[in-house]
Amino acid sequence: MPAADATAVTVAAAPPARRPATDSAGLGKGRALGFVAPALILIGIFLVFPALWSIYIGLTNYTLTGPASVNPQTVGLDNITGALSDPLFGNSLWLTLLFVLGSAVIGQNILGFTLAWTMRGARKWLRRTTEGLVLLAWILPSTVVAYLWIAVLDRDGGTLNLLLGNPATAWLVQYPMSSLIVFNVWRGTAFSMLLYSSALAVVPPSQLETARMVGASKWSTLKDVVFPHIRGHVLTNTLLVSLWTANDFSPFLLTAGGPNHQSETLPVFIYQQALGSGQLGYASAISFLLLLVNLVVALVYLRILRRRT
Amino acid sequence: MAQISIDALSTVYPNGVRAVDGLDLTIADGEFFALLGPSGCGKTTLLRTIAGLEQATSGAVSIGDREVTNVEPGRRNVAMVFQDYALFPHMTVSENIAYPLRVRKQPKAKQHEVAERTANSLSLGHLLERRPGQLSGGQQQRVALARAVAIDADVLLLDEPLSNLDARLRLEARTFLKRLQRELGVTTVFVTHDQAEALALADRIAVMESGGIRQLGSPREVFRRPANTFVANFIGSTPMNLVDGVVDGGQLAVAGAKMPSPQALPDGTKVTVGVRPEYLSLTTDGIGITGTVSIVENLGVSSLVTLECPDGTLIGVTVREQDEPAIGSRATAVPESGRLLLYSKEDGTLLG
Amino acid sequence: MTGLVLRRIGYTAFFAVVLAFFAIPMLWLASAPFDSKPGLGLRWPDWTFANIQTTFDHPYALTSLVNSLVLCTLAMVITTVLAACAAYALSRVRIPGRDALLYVLLLLSSVVTGTAAMVPIFVMMYQLGLINSQYGTALVIAGGMLPAAIFILKDFMDAVPRSYEESARVFGASPGQILLHVVVPVARPGIATIVVWSFVQAWGNFLLPFLLLRDIGSQPAAVLLRTLQDEGGSANLTVIPVFSLLYSIPVVVLYLFVSKRYGFRFHGGIKS
């Protein structure tokens, strides 16, 4: 039988020098590290290194053109102190805060939850259509949806003005932040909706029925029965969508920060400083600050997740 | 075909648990060998160490006259059937059975031929193009067996081969497995926690506990003369009666009765008396343990009668269905000669 | 009684508003491409297919779609292969520091966003001379997607029963054979999810190509759309709608395909 011959051959050969691996596939630690290495290298070069390097660049006065682009000098914490006294920076912080609070913390959260709550008992076609539309708004590419909204909000031919009987308002110019907030609610509600849908599905129906039997109003059912179950989800969802919104570059696509810095959220500010004004060192310092904020939020998020599970 | 030798094998996990503790074992060529014990006793660890999926901390494993302690699992020429059968869901039955040949880079034609031949010998010939998901539990088990016997391995290892089958199927599969092993004549080691299965299938059984072998012997030996109270407790569908007794004036005083002692022991020796319910007969008089019938459990052809003795001890007696006594009646349990076993009170080992 | 009626009305009104809110901006994408006199507002189109021809005639429209295809396929392949290998090893072998590594990966996937890293990445690629390089950009995009991809795939790999691999191993298969014969086929749904997810992410990515692919000939569709807007001119309304539609269709199709085949997989940047 062929197998017996194979055995004879392997017996004649020298036995392996080291003990075989104990993982289920026989990879062994060495080969396993080899499997992981390429991914880690790529992550190291394109995620970890830039994150750390931004500290270094942030400590210089590196610019895109001019003398400081060839010979950047270390300026220490000047970029940071400069930022603190830079009104544009303060402006971008304030606008980002508005953006996050308005569209994420309030807008997406509430709309997402409301949709999830009201669709629980909805008819199948209604639920399918609503979910489909909300999801579509989320998965269409960002440049496309930005343009769709530019079209809607246009002063002369935009759909919004057509519906309102032509008040000739240039929404993106006259109400830039409000437009951005509405846009972002439209864009991102899908995530909250899905999250709350699955969170609500886990609320024990028996508790909801008990509340109904006792005659509790819809509002107090929400407050006393539902909310305690989803409290953790509200927190984690808020943290996540806030993190994403604070880092969102889409405002650039709609208003490019204008008019006159009125909608210049932090991502747009960083871009304008780096590639508009060429202040790479300064922009880098600010990027690093954003990174720190992201880190704090992510750590808090993970801590909460861990405690929940 | 080869014998398996295990020398002073120990496996200690990083947390200090000794899964296998200084074990010595020789499994004869062509033997159908059972590793029997409760969960955590080390039987699966031992099986996987023979397979090469786990590494012992010290000691050696040899298959035939080759030491394989440090040899890759794929090079030991062993075949293994896992508890969940591990049939690859994306391959057909034929491809599953031929897989060991595919790994050895055998030509496709040969793979197909061997798969067909093996499948036919296990009555699977009509299922060759099906996927595992379309098979019943019994069929899946036979495909896993077919895959294991497709190559001419030295050793066949089975990890709880019958535990995933439902009760009726399990008995059929048991007979099938015993006949298959006899035909093939390959050294087979199987792991089980079901003592009835081990007794029915194996040529020899190793009863294990906490990493060590508590008794090694044929099913008959293990059943009739368990080497210690652990084995006595573990073996047997109905639990063995284990009762405190004391040697008194050449006789055995147990549960308020006096009987001739099977061993000559000094007076006053405390012992544990062991006797199987199957080896006791219930009479109205005779030399034995007397008590009141308190519970009668119907087991089909026989019944298990529980006698409550005046000192509170409970004795189980198996009787035929037509001899069922009335509840509350007085009866005496008389042991068959030679069936009374005495165990040391200190370490539970069999005396004599 | 009135309460019930009021509630019904409120319910209907709510859904009407919500559906209108979400649908109206998107309806333009269905009407404007086929309108011979397209405007920015929503109107019943004057049906024509001429705009499609105009778009195809545009010097950069089709090129950019091809660019997108190349870029995203590259990024997708790199991400999937590297993440699959890493996820497999992490799932099976207890590498020293594995848990810490997984935690760090989780953090990285949401902390180092495109916005936070845009400056150092730009500087790095600029100094390396990799601006306008398709390969360079694909690597950067892949690097950004890898942590999340590894995480998602590891879950799928964990679900492949170890007995499959052990069985193959006892029968003599080498780790490579085990991976190819057993693990990859069984983990196929997970791998398909990552293939689609990474492609879609890369397809919609605007910031990185915008920063790194400045030459109009190498711009993917995401950036070209913006460039077309910036160019201005009324002629563009014949091109932009069609182009937007063409650009959006692959994403929608892929999503439908995945959700039909495998159910809608709910993966945010971090799994919840």
Image: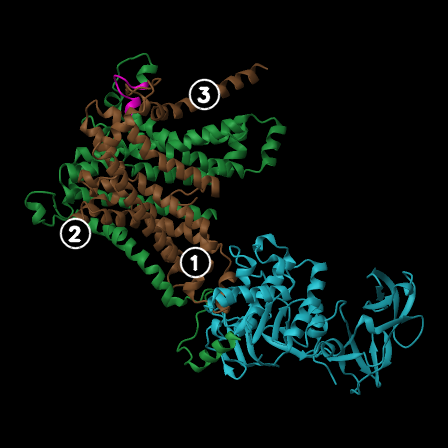
Q: Decide if residue A275 is on the left or right side of residue C3.
A: left
Q: Nearer the viewer, residue A127 or C244?
A: C244
Check the residue under mark 3 and report the chain it is in: C
Q: Is residue B44 above or below residue A119?
A: below
Q: Nearer the viewer, residue B122 or A200?
A: B122
Q: Decide if residue A182 is on the left or right side of residue A202.
A: left
The tag on residue C16 is: 3
Q: Report the colour scheme.
A: by chain
Identify the residue position indicated by label 2 in the image.
C128
Identify the residue position indicated by label 1 in the image.
C91
Q: Position of residue B100 (x, y in %)?
A: 51, 67
Q: Nearer the viewer, residue A152 or B347?
A: A152
Q: Which chain is cyan?
A: B
Q: Which chain is brown?
A: C
Q: Position of residue A216 (x, y in %)?
A: 58, 27
Q: CA distance from mark 2 to mark 1?
A: 35 Å
The boundaries of the magenta stretch are A150-159
Q: Residue at x 88, y 65 (%)?
A: B292
